[in-house]
Image (tube, rainbow, N blue to C red):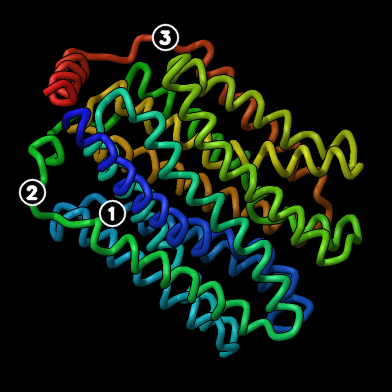
Amino acid sequence: MTKNSAPSWLFIAIAGSCATLIGLALGRFSYVPLLPLLIDAHWTSPGGAAQLAAANLIGYLVGALAAHRIALKVGPASAIKGALLAVVLSLAACGINAGLAWLWAWRFIAGAAGGLVMILSAPYVLSRVPVALRGKTAGMVFCGIGCGIMLSGVIVPAFGAAHLGAAWLALAAIAAIALLYAWPKFHDKGSEPADRPEHGKLVPGGALLALLCAYVLDAVGYIPHTVFWVEYLVHGLHKPLSIGGAFWVVFGAGAVAGPLLSGYAADRFGFRNTLIACFALKAMAVALPLASSSMFALFASSFVVGALTPGLVAVLSGRVIEIVGVAQHQRSWALLTFSYAVLQAAGGYAMAALYAATHSFTALFAIGASALGLGALILLLSSGAGFGASGVNHLRNDIHKSND
């Protein structure tokens, strides 16, 4: 890729951003402001609403497990496009109140599609940009999550207060618009050899193992805010739904800024150092509601956790490339994402059960903050070196390609 063609990275980065907006923000995180509305509109009980959240997590687990094999069979671009289309259909289908089983099935499908998008979109995009732009590009890809969260924070209260089905359909319409832009940007023709996965050890070691351990702890640490945050504000602190929606917009604003800032920081200070800082800061932000429920504390917690939910993932994805190289990125990223999904599903079910039994949020925030703090400690104590011989050779090849 030459300097004159540099703007081309922006178009594929925006397509990646659209993919995360659809597959993760609208397919997954838009459920957070919808959860109290489902209860208040009597579409389901509090326990049923928690089960719908868990259905999405289980679907995510299944999608993460199948993503790599599907990509090998049909091509990563085709798999991404199919997953994005499935999310659009699931959002539209959820606009029909046909009972808990109907909603559970479609939330499961949305979760499975989100798992595919999470694994496949970043490797697809990052393999097509110069090495020097990977931090910035990863930030752009994952800031789509924040854009979708902000949109859902505005759309859901505006439409859902009068008619819950209309809120689901509005989300589907936004997803369809984003899909129109992204669709032609993903294509399997002309894939470079680096896109084809190589064989490697199934169980990682060294820096990649430390990364895996920390990442699965993030899967537990972020659940209180990404499942129960609006529920905590509305039913835990007895704030009006408008306040819950507003703070979800704040969360989304953080999720827009976070990946961009963390991506720039990774390019400047290194992926490993930036990742440790992300874990530590996120742990403090998740714990903040335990210390104070003031509006300032709630605002800070919303924004910082919002920023570091996709921001941490953007840096971590770049760190995987730094360790294993582009050719192994999709395979290694699939392993990390699947492991993340397992802990996310287990943690989501456990926290849903804990909340259903106690109707208390204190333990949820304490567990989440502790998990993130432990993740920061693991990364801090692990070796900074991540390159095996294969990783070094891949990086050299990547640099030569970007300078051609």
Q: Which residue, given by chain and number where applicable, does mark 3 sit on?
A: 383
Q: Position of residue 400 (x, y in %)?
A: 13, 19
When the figure is inspected, residue 195 is found, relative to residue 179, above or below; the finding is: above
Dot 1 corresponds to which residue?
67
Lower position in the chain sequence, tag 3 or tag 1: 1
Please determine whether, in this image, residue 290 is positioned above or below residue 55: above
Q: Is residue 61 visible?
A: no
Disc 2 residue crowd, few under 14, some 14–19, many 20+, Cα 10 Å: few
Report which residue position mark 2 lands on. Answer: 190
x and y percent of residue 117 in the render? 36, 54
In the depicted structure, whether residue 193 falls above or below residue 14: above
Q: Quadrant of the C terminus?
A: top left
Residue type at the position of mark 2: Gly
Query: Would residue 361 be seen by someone viewing this image from the given angle?
Result: yes
Foreground residue, 285 or 186?
Answer: 186
Question: Residue shown at 71%/49% (left/top)?
Answer: 250
**Location of the N terminus (image quadrant):** top left
Q: Residue at x 41, y 64 (%)?
A: 178
Q: Secondary structure at mark 1?
A: helix
Q: Identify the mark nearer the N-term, 1 or 2.
A: 1
Rendered location of residue 334, percent (x, y): 31, 43
Marks 1,2: beta carbons within 8 A: no
